[in-house]
């Protein structure tokens, strides 16, 4: 596979997060590979209720997450993009992440080889680390290599000025790093919360 799934975590279309996603998709497509940008804001995705129905290996909620699970399983890189919201990921992206609880119960479900993140924030000196910790924990739970993250602060001041340049350089690095991985190197399952 040579496909990237990019998940846009902003609830607002046309903002800095979407600009990051579109730049990453363009950079990957220009290298001759597939990139699909998913917009959970335009999808019907319910909250995980912790019902534990997914012990069976399938989430029992029949909504648009079923499409995201399929795209996730058919990609070899996933990139999460989110604005910082009170130092965490957007609640929209967190809702999506929580619905991957089924992977906690069944580690054999199909998943990308690798994962990365692009984070933007209004302040010039935001605290990105809680969001990075959450996304790294997610990568561990779903058995993906963590390839790193891009920080794009200062959007209150500069909007999306400079996004394309920053995202292109980052995307080229992680796309190349993903190409150098082999499936034999996938991390073994670790306990949730590490990372
Ligand atoms: C609810 C909310 C919480 C936010 N919290 C933070 C924050 O903790 N730190 C920060 O630097 N910016 C924060 N911001 C600013 C956004 O991260 C910033 O405007 C971002 O560029 C928005 O991206 P978007 O237009 O793609 O949604 C917050 C914005 C909102 C709406």
Image (cartoon, rainbow, N blue to C red):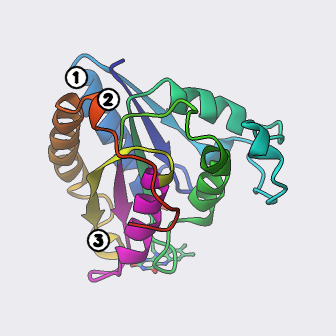
Specify whether tag 3 is near ligand 1 (CB below 8 Å).
yes
> Which is more foreground, mark 3 or mark 2?
2
Is residue 52 in view? yes
Q: Which residue is mark 1?
A: 30
Q: Position of residue 48 (x, y in %)?
A: 76, 56
Residue 64 appears in the figure:
no
SS class of the residue under badge 2? helix
Whether tag 3 and tag 2 are in contact, CB under 8 A, the answer is no
Horizontally, residue 70 falls left or right of residue 56, namely left
Question: Which secondary structure lies at badge 3?
Answer: loop
The image's mark for residue 155 is none
The circle drawn on residue 153 is 3
**Label for residue 183?**
2
- The answer to whether marks 2 and 1 mark residues whose Cβ atoms lie closer than 8 Å is no
Real-space Cα distance between discs 3 and 1?
A: 26 Å
Q: Which residues are magenta?
A: 116-140
Taking depth in this image into account, of 129 and 145 the one nearest to the observer is 145
């Amino acid at each position: 596979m040579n496909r990237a799934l990019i998940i846009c975590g902003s609830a607002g279309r046309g903002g800095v997060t979407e600009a990051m996603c579109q730049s990453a998709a363009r950079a990957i497509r220009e290298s001759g590979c597939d990139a699909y940008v998913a917009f959970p804001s335009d999808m019907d995705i319910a909250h995980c209720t912790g019902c534990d129905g997914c012990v069976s290996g399938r989430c029992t909620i029949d909504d648009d997450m079923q499409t995201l699970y399929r795209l996730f399983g058919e990609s070899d890189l996933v990139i999460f993009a989110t604005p910082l919201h009170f130092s965490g990921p957007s609640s929209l992206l967190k809702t999506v992440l929580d619905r991957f609880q089924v992977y906690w119960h069944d580690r054999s479900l199909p998943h990308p080889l690798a994962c990365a993140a692009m984070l933007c924030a209004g302040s010039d000196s935001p605290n990105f680390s809680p969001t990075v910790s959450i996304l790294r924990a997610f990568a561990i739970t779903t058995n993906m290599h963590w390839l790193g993250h891009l920080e794009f602060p200062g959007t209150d001041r500069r909007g999306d000025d400079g996004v394309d340049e920053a995202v292109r350089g980052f995307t080229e690095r992680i796309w190349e790093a993903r190409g150098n991985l082999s499936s034999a190197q996938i991390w073994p399952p670790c306990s949730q919360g590490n990372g």
